[in-house]
Image (cartoon, rainbow, N blue to C red):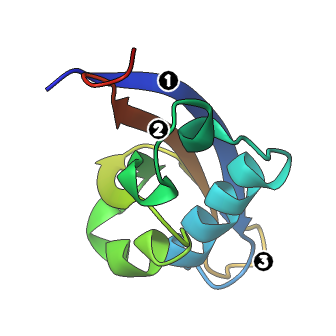
């Protein structure tokens, strides 16, 4: 199999008051995808379902991330979500829950073995 990563997009999202790592990550994914309309699969004569999408999410508490919710954002492709320690928790001066910042890197790959 000749799987080739063809693009990577980056995004950032936050949860201002609820310390919701999943919502911050979902916003980061939407941030990465919002400005793009890439017909990558079609360019290589593939179906969108053939895309292998890897979503790496950096948050301070990776165990609190619902990876299924993040994967469900994508309407097609084979999605893998990897939660990593990263992002940032910003303490609030009013004593409330910290503001959560999530970072994502979305990589898209295709098996190009049979593409001429």
Q: Quadrant of the C terminus?
A: top left
State the image coordinates of residue 77 (x, y, percent, origin top left).
Answer: 42, 59
Q: Which residue is mark 3?
A: 94
**Cα distance in 3D space between marks 1 and 2:** 6 Å
Q: Residue at x 13, y 26 (%)?
A: 1
Mark 3 neighbour density, 10 Å: few (under 14) some (14–19) many (20 or more): few
62 lies left or right of 46: left
**Cα distance in 3D space between marks 3 and 1:** 45 Å
In the figure, residue 49 lies in which quadrant?
bottom left
Which one is nearer the viewer's eye here, 43 or 64? 43
Mark 1 neighbour density, 10 Å: few (under 14) some (14–19) many (20 or more): few
75 lies left or right of 55: right
Mark 2 neighbour density, 10 Å: few (under 14) some (14–19) many (20 or more): many
State the image coordinates of residue 14 (x, y, percent, origin top left).
Answer: 70, 63
Element at label 3: loop
Q: Which residue is mark 2?
A: 108
Q: Residue at x 40, y 24 (%)?
A: 5
Name the residue at the left extreme: 1
Q: Residue at x 60, y 69 (%)?
A: 26
80 lies left or right of 109: left
Which one is nearer the viewer's eye here, 35 or 10? 35
State the image coordinates of residue 97 (x, y, percent, origin top left).
Answer: 61, 79
Name the residue at the right extreme: 35
Residue 98 appears anywhere in the view: no
Q: Would you say the residues marked 1 and 2 are in contact, meaning their CB atoms lie under 8 Å apart?
A: yes
Q: Which residue is mark 1?
A: 6
Name the residue at the top extreme: 116
**Cα distance in 3D space between marks 2 and 3:** 41 Å
For residue 13, above or below residue 41: below
Q: Nearer the viewer, mark 2 or mark 3?
A: 2
């Amino acid at each position: 199999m000749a799987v080739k990563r063809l693009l990577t997009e980056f995004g950032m999202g936050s949860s201002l008051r609820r310390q919701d790592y999943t919502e911050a990550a979902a916003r980061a994914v939407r941030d990465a995808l919002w400005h793009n309309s890439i017909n990558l699969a079609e360019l290589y004569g593939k179906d969108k379902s053939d895309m292998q999408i890897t979503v790496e999410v950096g948050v301070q508490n990776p165990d609190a991330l619902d990876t299924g919710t993040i994967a469900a954002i994508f309407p097609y492709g084979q999605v893998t979500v990897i939660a990593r320690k990263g992002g940032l928790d910003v303490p609030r001066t009013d004593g409330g829950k910290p503001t959560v910042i999530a970072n994502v890197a979305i990589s898209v790959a295709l098996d190009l073995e049979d593409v001429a």
